[in-house]
Image (cartoon, rainbow, N blue to C red):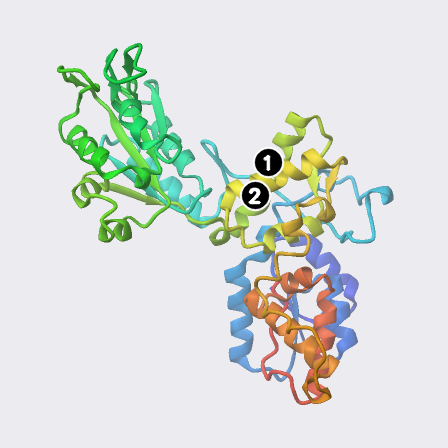
Amino acid sequence: MIVDLETLGQDGFLSRLAAAQPQAMLMAVSARESLTRSLAAMEAGAHDVISFPANPRAVAEKIDRFLIQNTRSLRDTAAPRHLREGRGRLPTGERNGTENTHALPEATAPFRFERFVGGSQRMREVYDQIRRIAPSNAPVFVTGESGSGKDLCAAAIHARSPRKNAPFIAINCAAIPGELMESEIFGHVRGAFAGAADARTGAAELADGGTLFLDEIGEMDLALQSKLLRFVQTGLVQRIGDTRTRSVDVRIVCATNRDPHVEIAGGRFREDLFYRLHVLPIRMPALRDRREDILPLATSFLARFAEEEGRAFSEIAPCAGERLLTHGWPGNVRQLENAIRQAVVMHEGTRLLADMLPSFLTGQGLSTRLEPIRERGPRRAIEIEPLWAQEKRIIESALDAFDGNIAKAAAALEISPSTIYRKRQSWSGRGEGSADFTGFAG
């Protein structure tokens, strides 16, 4: 939504407009270039202020950035319950000097699909694939980074399939020693090897009529891969030490965090087995590629762990939410889950505050994304940068790290977005500013 400040008049009207349209991106325009006026408009709810005359291409790029980042929809998922129910502002005693007292609004409950939480476009595409794939008996090959939810995908496929009332048997190929893996999958008879005091039914037989999920199949050794290939081709199971074969009706779902093509090229995965299993592929997106799901996931984890640990946490404070949104999450959903659990176990309260989050979220996250600080020690005066130049370098590095998103860069630097606005205005005065000012995407 683009609003003209001169036509709108007082900032109170802008505040009411922002409150009435909580999901809208507000871009204010003004014929007068005034820093004070721009800051007041942003305080009233505008995401950016453009002074005319303006470059139409720059304006279009800012609007595109807003639409792509869809930051407001991210914030909509983090509303405190008392604000959703119209009970007003936070009690004074629940605020502290480090928290933003302007709560992030939330309008709806998190979107859920089977055991998944999150309604991002990327995940809705995955849900649609699961719905289409589930009725089939063909093998499914799930790929994705560690912690991205490949096991939940396999379970959802089983739950949506005609086999849902039959067993779902999961085997983690990375957690079982190679010499025991064949017995885990195919079973063994008594006396088949040293220590085999009793006969054992393998996972393939236990899953008869249902689904066999082979997680981290890329960790399976080549010798066992050839036996698995025979099983996939024939549907026959032969226990270790047995002369008989047994026919089973099993749907196979497998998953790996490795690139199967790289593994095949490296001779670590059989190409013929890959093409037998890679019939219905699904790629799980990384958490950083579906950031709008971060707060719904965090809220869900907070509620679950608060109940399990006997804590009173019921909401995520805005500043903590910003930290969660701007982290890279290399460990994906599993890392987010562990971070929330650690915070719940180690702290007390009703709101999850920023300083309750694990250390990698409270100051270390940006350090790996910005250029390293120069080595300390004596140096010649000619090598020392002016303070404004150092600030400019640090702020612009943070903006690059967050793709020009000033709100997220400011949160990572622990400064106000208006500070970045003022600094860039001062650089323009020195002739160092950019011609096209980066918008307040946030």
Callout in the foreground (1, 2) = 2
Badge 1 density bin: few <14, some 14–19, many ≥20, Cα 10 Å: many
Residue wearing tag 1: 301
370, above or below 286, in the image: below
333, above or below 45, in the image: above
Q: Percent x, y for residue 298?
A: 60, 41
Mark 2, secondary structure of its residue: helix
Indicate the amino acid at tag 2.
Answer: Leu
Q: Percent x, y for residue 114?
A: 45, 31
Q: Quadrant of residue 107?
A: top right
Q: Percent x, y for residue 164?
A: 34, 22
Residue wearing tag 2: 336
Disc on the earlier residue, 1 or 2:
1
Q: Percent x, y for residue 317?
A: 71, 46
Q: CA distance from mark 1 to mark 2?
A: 9 Å
Tell me which residue sits at (58%, 51%) in the image.
74
Q: Quadrant of the C terminus?
A: bottom right
Furthest residue to the front? 194
Q: Quadrant of the N terminus?
A: bottom right
Residues marked 1 and 2 touching at CB (< 8 Å): yes
353, above or below 424, in the image: above
Badge 2 density bin: few <14, some 14–19, many ≥20, Cα 10 Å: many
